Image (cartoon, rainbow, N blue to C red):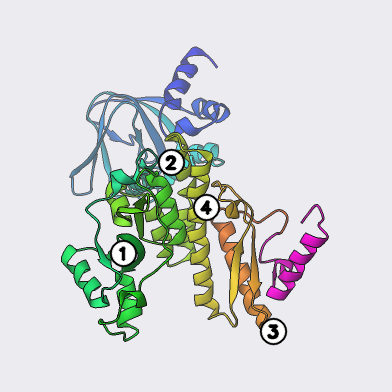
Amino acid sequence: MDIELQEIRDFIASIPPFDRLPEEYLGHLTRAIAIRYIRRGKSMPPDSDKPPELYILRQGAVTLHSSEGNLVGMLGEGDICTSFCSHGEATGFTVKVTEDTLVYVIPCSTLTEIVKDHPTVESFFRQTSAQRLKQAVTTQQQESAVNSSLMSTTVEDVISGGVVSVDLKATIGDAARVMTDNGVSSVLITERGRPVGIITDRDLRKRCLAAGLSRQESVREIMTTGMLHVNSNASAFDALMIMTRKHIHHLPVIDDEQLKGMLTTTDLIRHEGRNSVYLSSSIRKAESLGSLVEMSRMLPELQMQLINMGGSAEHVGKAITAVTGAITRRLIEMAEEKFGPPPVPYAWIAGGSQARFEQSSHSDQDNALIISDEMTSEHEAWFESLANFVCDGLNDCGYIYCPGDAMASNPKWRQPRKVWAGYFESWINTPEPMA
C-alpha cells in the first residue's frame, strides 16, 4: 500500500465504527474509496442520480437540515454522513456544504459488501442516527447498572439511621405502630437486648392481615426467626450477595451479639444507584423470554466491571451466580404460567459451577429435577415440558447446554425422589469415577 493510501487507511481506522474492522477489511475499504472535493454552498450528494454513497469528511464542514429547513446537525473532520446509507433516513434531509470540503466517498453497496461479516459495523449503517443515539444511551445505562463500588465499602458505611426494635413481649399492633412512627419497613424483635426475630411489612400483610390474625397477638406469631446477619466490618458487596441469593431485603448488622443496625436494599441502592440487586430485581419482573435474554447480555459487562474494580474470583463468581439464580427462578415461573401448576411437588437442582458459586458470564448449565414420589406416568409430560423450557431458556440467555448432558432435560436427571435416593446410595457405596 503506497503512502497516500496508507494515510487514508490510518485516518479511516481511527473513526468508529471502522476502528472495529480487522486490517484486511480496512485495506479493502481504503482501496474502494474515492476522493472528492466539494465547494462551499453546494449540496450533497452533488449528483442525485448516482447510487447512494457514504461520505467521510476529511476536511471542511457540512450541515444537515430537515424537510422544513430546520438545522438538525453539523458534521466536521472525522465525521461520517450516513444519511444516504441508513434505511429510511435520507428522505426529507438536505445536506449543505458550509466550507470547502474534502470527502472520502464509497458506494453504500460496496460498503455493505465489505462489512457484511462484521454485524456490529454493518448495523451502524443500517440504523438511523436516532437509533444509534438510543443504542448509545442503552449501553450507558447498562454500564451504570453493573458498575459497583461496594467491594471497597463496609456495611457500617452503608447503613442509615438507628436500630428500630420492640421487645419479644410486644403485640403485633405495637410493632406496627413502631414501624409507622419511625417510617421503616421492618422492626427487629429483641429479648433482653439480643435480636431473636424480625417483622417486615410483608409479614404484617401476609401473616397478620391476610390470615385474619388479631393485632393483639404476640409478635411471636408472625416474626421470622433464624435470621441471617452480617457484622459491621463485612464488605457491603458480600452483604449484597447474601440478600440477592436469599431474595431478602433486610439484613441485621450484629457485632459480638450486639445489634448495631439494619441493612436494607434501600441503603444499598441509595449508596450505589444501580447494581446486581437492581438487575436481579429487573429479572424477576421480566415479562418474556426476550426480556431475560436482553438482561443476560449485561453479564459480560458486569463481570468486566467487577474484575476492573479488583474483585476476586470469589466475588465475581458469587455475583454472576446470583444473577443466574434469578434468571432460573424466573424461567421456572414462566414455565408454570405456560403449562399450569405442577401436578406434584418438585425441586429444581442447580449443579456444577452454579452450585459452587463459581459461574462466569460464559458458563454452561448443570441442573436436575427431584420430583415427589407421588408422580405417575401421566405427570411425566408436564415435567418434561418444564425441563425443556427452562434449559432452552438458559441456553438462550447464554448458559450453554451442558456438554455432558447433565441437565433436567435428560430423563436420567429428571426422576422421583426414590430414584435419586438409589443414585446416591450407589454413588456412596459403590462409587465410580463419574460419581
Which range of residues does the magenta coloring cover?
A: 406-435
User: Marks 1 and 2, how far apart in space?
Assistant: 79 Å
Q: Helix, strand or loop at disc 2?
A: loop
Q: Amino acid at mark 3?
A: Thr
Viewer-nearest of discs 3 and 2: 3
According to the picture, the residue beneath numbered tag 4 turns out to be: 321
What residue is rendered at 49% in x and 37% in y? 111
Q: Would you identify the image quadrant in which residue 62 lies?
A: top left
Q: Quadrant of the C terminus?
A: bottom right
Is 109 situated left or right of 404 in this image? left
Residue linked to disc 3:
376
Q: Is residue 372 magenta?
A: no
Give the residue displayed 43% in from the left and 41% down from the top: 51
**Dot 2 crowding, Cα within 10 Å, few <14, some 14–19, many 20+:** few
Q: Give the residue pinned by disc 1.
A: 190
The circle on residue 51 is 2
* In the rendered image, the vertical position of residue 32 relative to residue 358, given as above or below: above
Farthest residue toward the front?
Answer: 192
Q: Are marks 2 and 4 in contact (CB under 8 Å)?
A: no
